[in-house]
Amino acid sequence: MSPLPNRFLGDLATSAIGFGAMVLSPGMYGEIDDSRAVSALHAALDEGATLIDTSDGYGADGHNERLVGEALKGRRDGAVVATKFGFRIPEGAASHRFPVSYAFGELAVNAEPRYVRGYAEQSLRNLGTDVIDLYYPHFPDPEVPLEDTVGAVADLVQDGLVRHLGLSNVTAGQLRRAHAVHPVAAVQTQWSMWQPVDTELHAAARELGVGIVAWSPLGSGFLAGKVENLAADDFRRNISRFDEANLKANNDRYAPLRGIAADLGLTPSQLALAWLLHQDDHVVPIPGSRTPAHIAENLSAARVDLHADSLARIDEVLADLTPEGTGSLLG
C-alpha cells in the first residue's frame, strides 16, 4: 500500500489525516483497556498516520500521553507528536473558568507563563520523548493574555523542547495576535459536515499560512454512521445533539449524506473525511477510533478524490441541513 499523502501545517509535514487519541482514554466513549488502546495507536501508525494528537488533559494524570508514549517506543522518528496543555493545573495554582456549551458548562484552565515549562516537561516524561513536535495551549486562558502564554512556548522552542507552536480553540483575532509574537504552525478547531469552521478563523489561517487541524471531523462519531445508543459513561451525553430526541431527528436529517456515500462506494466516515480534505489543502483531520478496521477505513479517505459533481451534490445537501441541538464545544 502506498504511503498516505502528506500535507503541511505551516512548514511541518504530516500525513493528510492524523489520529486523535482522546478516544483511547476511559470516560470518553466508554471503558477501554490500555492494551487495546496501544493496539489502536499501532494500527494508526501502521496505516500511515504520522500526526498523533493527544493532551495532558485526556484521562487522569496524563494517561493519554502515556499511552502515546508506550505506542511510540521504537517508532518515534516516524511520528509527529502533538499535545496540548493547560488542564493539569498544579497544586495551589488558580483555576480559571472557561465557559463552554456542553452540559458541564465550563472548563478549568491555567495557562500562566510560569507554569508552561512545567507542563511541557511533564508531557515529555509522559510521552517518553525529548521534544514535542507541535505544542498547543488547549484553550486560551480567559485571565492571561494569549501573547504571554505564546511567549512561554516560544521560549521552549528556543530551548529545543518544542519544535512548533500550535493554537487550539481560538478566534481569528487571537490567532493574529499570537502569530505576531511567534509563528503559528497550526490552529486546531472543530470542523466537519456537522460543525462548520469559523469563516473568519479560516480566512486568517489562510492569510498567515497557518494549517488547520480539524478536531471532531466525524462529529464525535455521528458522521461515521447512524448513532442510536450511548453508554451511560459516554462523553457525548454532554452534547445536546446527542439527546434522545435530537439524535433521532439528526439521524433522519443526515440520511441523504449516507445515501451519497453508498452511491460513491464509500463509507459515511470516508465521505465526511474526504469532503473535509477537499475544503482546504492545509486542513488535517484527526479522527479517532478504537478499532483497527475503522482506523484503516478512516485513513484511506486521504486517497479519495471526490469529483466536482459529487462535491456539489454534498454541498447542496449540507446547505439545507440544520442539526438539532448545539454541536460546538464553544457555543
Image (tube, grey):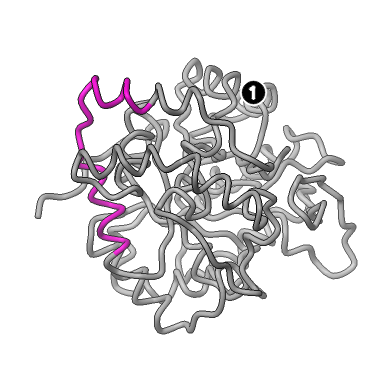
Whether 193 is among the magenta residues is no
Q: Residue furthest left?
A: 1
Placement of the N terminus among the 4 image quadrants: bottom left
Q: Residue at x 37, y 73 (%)?
A: 71
Q: Is residue 72 visible?
A: no
Placement of the C terminus among the 4 image quadrants: top right
Whether 311 is among the magenta residues is yes
Q: Residue 321 location in percent, x, y?
A: 52, 30
Magenta extent:
294-314
Q: Quadrant of residue 175?
A: top right
Q: Residue at x 47, y 74 (%)?
A: 67
Pick whichever, 118 or 93, lies toward us: 93
What main secondary structure does the magenta stretch of the protein show? Answer: helix
In the image, residue 262 above or below residue 89: above
Pick whichever, 283 or 198, lies toward us: 198
Q: Residue at x 43, y 59 (%)?
A: 288
In the image, residue 8 above or below residue 289: above
Q: Quadrant of residue 62?
A: bottom right
Query: Amino acid under label 1?
Result: Ala
Horizontal side of residue 230 vs 185, given as left or right: right
Read off the residue under disc 1.
172
Q: Is residue 201 visible?
A: yes
Q: Residue at x 69, y 22 (%)?
A: 173
Horizontal side of residue 20 vs 326, given as left or right: left
